[in-house]
Image: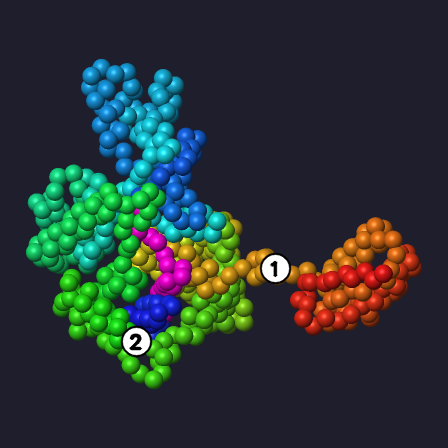
């Protein structure tokens, strides 16, 4: 089945769609006004160190301070100083309660795991990279372990490590790649070999390595000149990243509708994958690109809570600040003869759709799936295996637990960016994200109570209540008796005026002298 990358590029927004056999697999969006910052490198200033959380807040010039956890701090210099003291007869413990929790004689942290208060001080300047964009009310997640990505390699200039993509399964190939990197890398640096590098030559790896090391030299020079806080390095655009990360031999075409971005993309691909350059195609049709490929509708539905299954069942996706909950229902699907078989088929169809929706919507964090209860153990096992298979192609890290006795499955999925719903939508100003508003009758009684309170503090005068026409109708008909009784109690004349410009949840009380 063929796979295409579609790129709709405009001055105000870039949209990337990964399409397989006409079905939308992934959708990414970048807006200059809301550009993601993952990969950007900053000179930051430590503004607060929190030993109790083993973390620090770092000012990098954004609206909110970034969050830097102790394990994301580059600690080589601190560790070196502590190890020198041990070698010279210092009394620091060689291990800690992290390793031996039952030994009360050990300190909380050992020399190789120093605390945040040993690593950072308030006012200190640090070079940090954004690992996760700000999400909701949280600031950006920062790291001092800088990484720079290229086509075949990820460079870690401050980490002595060699890693091989887990998706390269051939042990012989893995060992050969490890030996290539070991023979080429400078001492004390690290590299991760990406999946696309499985069959590349040593020359291609060496070229990537040289490019990344020159880029790191430029970043270090820029950091020395940078104000604090200040941006040192800005990652490449989404259009170029899509070619770098998604364009492989399995991609049929990369179709882009902007002539300017098409030329820029051709130059970029020529530097690392010239053999794939012919797959970059400029689209100049009269029908907009996404409409021509029939995926505009799929994008519009990607933020809907209800997703229908082919059988007539459906799933409901509810996202909160802490987690995402997915509920599976049979809906219109009634099966044929056996209830257990009907439930099993609905759940199995839901598995494939859920895996697709998690990937499409960029849903990360904790995910709870409430499948329809199944009694048969073989059905539960088959569902767990189907879920593992369906999530196998996901590029984000995923962990799936087995189904509980209550039919619940817990998934944790790497949260790499803001989910699609929060990118496309914003919180309703009327219900403030609750998804519900007060009923008309609740509002009527709220108005009655407010009238009673205000009448006690206002000496005289009549009252005009301005409300939405739908609320006015309820007040003047079904609630007319309560309104007359309120007039008697307050000794005021109360008039109801319909105001079409007012939202149903808004009302005005105007006291007349």
What are the residue bounds of the magenta stretch?
24-42
- Does residue 409 appear in the picture of this structure? no
Q: Where's the N terminus, which quadrant?
A: bottom left
Residue at (34%, 32%) from the top-left corner?
120
450 vs 96, left or right, is: right
| Residue 20 drawn at (x, y percent) | 31, 71
Q: Quadrant of the C terminus?
A: bottom right
* Residue 363: quadrant of the picture: bottom left
Give the CA separation, mark 1 to mark 2: 39 Å
Q: Residue furthest bottom?
A: 286
Count of residue discs: 2
Tell which of 494 and 313 is nearer to you: 494
Which is more N-terminal, label 2 or label 1?
2
Question: Which residue, given by chain and number where applicable, does mark 1 sit on?
Answer: 431
Q: Quadrant of residue 143?
A: top left
Left or right, 207 with reference to 408: left
Question: Where 109 falls versus 438 (above or below)?
Answer: above
Residue 39 shown in magenta: yes
Q: Quadrant of residue 264?
A: bottom left
Q: Inspect the magenta stretch and tell me whether residue 294 lies in it.
A: no
Q: Badge 1: how crowded within 10 Å, few (<14), some, or many (20+)?
A: few
Secondary structure under tag 1 reads: loop
Q: Does residue 211 appear in this view?
A: yes
Residue for badge 2: 257
Report x, y in % for residue 196. Answer: 19, 59
């Amino acid at each position: 089945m063929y796979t295409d990358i579609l790129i709709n590029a405009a001055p105000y927004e870039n949209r990337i769609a990964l399409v397989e056999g006409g079905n939308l697999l992934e959708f990414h969006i970048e807006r200059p006004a809301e550009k993601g910052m993952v990969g950007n490198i900053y000179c930051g200033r430590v503004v607060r160190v929190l030993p109790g959380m083993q973390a620090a807040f770092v000012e990098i010039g954004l609206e909110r301070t970034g969050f830097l956890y102790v394990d994301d701090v580059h600690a080589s210099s601190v560790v070196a100083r502590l190890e020198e003291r041990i070698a010279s007869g210092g009394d620091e413990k060689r291990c800690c309660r992290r390793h031996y929790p039952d030994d009360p004689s050990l300190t909380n942290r050992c020399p190789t795991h120093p605390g945040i208060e040993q690593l950072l001080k308030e006012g200190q300047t640090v070079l940090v990279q954004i690992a996760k964009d700000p999400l909701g009310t949280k600031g950006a997640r920062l790291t001092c372990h800088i990484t720079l990505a290229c086509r075949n390699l990820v460079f870690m200039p401050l980490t002595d490590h060699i890693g091989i993509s887990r998706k390269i399964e051939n042990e012989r190939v893995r060992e050969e790649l490890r030996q290539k990197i070991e023979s080429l890398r400078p001492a004390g640096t690290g590299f991760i070999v990406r999946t696309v590098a499985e069959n590349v030559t040593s020359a291609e790896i060496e070229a990537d390595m040289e490019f990344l090391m020159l880029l790191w030299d430029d970043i270090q020079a820029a950091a020395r000149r940078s104000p604090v806080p200040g941006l040192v390095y800005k990652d490449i655009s989404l259009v170029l990243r899509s070619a770098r990360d998604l364009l492989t031999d399995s991609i049929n075409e990369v179709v882009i509708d902007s002539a300017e971005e098409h030329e820029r993309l051709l130059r970029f691909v020529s530097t690392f994958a010239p053999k794939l350059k012919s797959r970059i195609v400029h689209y100049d049709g009269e029908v907009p690109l996404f409409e021509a490929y029939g995926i505009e509708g799929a994008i519009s539905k990607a933020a809907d809570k209800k997703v229908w299954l082919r059988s007539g069942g459906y799933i409901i996706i509810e996202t909160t600040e802490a987690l995402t909950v997915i509920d599976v229902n049979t809906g219109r699907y009634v099966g044929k003869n056996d209830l257990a078989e009907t439930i099993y088929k609905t759940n199995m169809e839901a598995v494939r759709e859920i895996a697709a929706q998690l990937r499409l919507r960029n849903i990360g964090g904790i995910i709870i799936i409430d499948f329809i209860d199944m009694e048969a153990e073989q059905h539960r096992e088959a569902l767990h295996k189907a879920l593992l298979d369906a999530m196998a192609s996901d590029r984000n890290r995923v962990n799936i637990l087995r189904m509980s006795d209550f039919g619940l499955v817990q998934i944790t999925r790497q949260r790499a960016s803001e989910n699609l719903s929060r990118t496309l939508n914003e919180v309703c100003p009327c219900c403030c994200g609750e998804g519900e508003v007060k009923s008309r009758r609740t509002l009527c009684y709220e108005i009655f109570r407010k009238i009673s309170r205000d009448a006690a503090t206002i000496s005289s005068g009549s009252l005009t209540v301005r409300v939405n026409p739908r609320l006015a109708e309820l007040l003047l008909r079904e609630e007319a008796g309560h309104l007359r009784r309120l007039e008697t109690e307050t000794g005021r004349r109360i008039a109801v005026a319909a105001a079409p410009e007012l939202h149903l949840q808004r009302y005005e009380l105007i006291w007349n002298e």
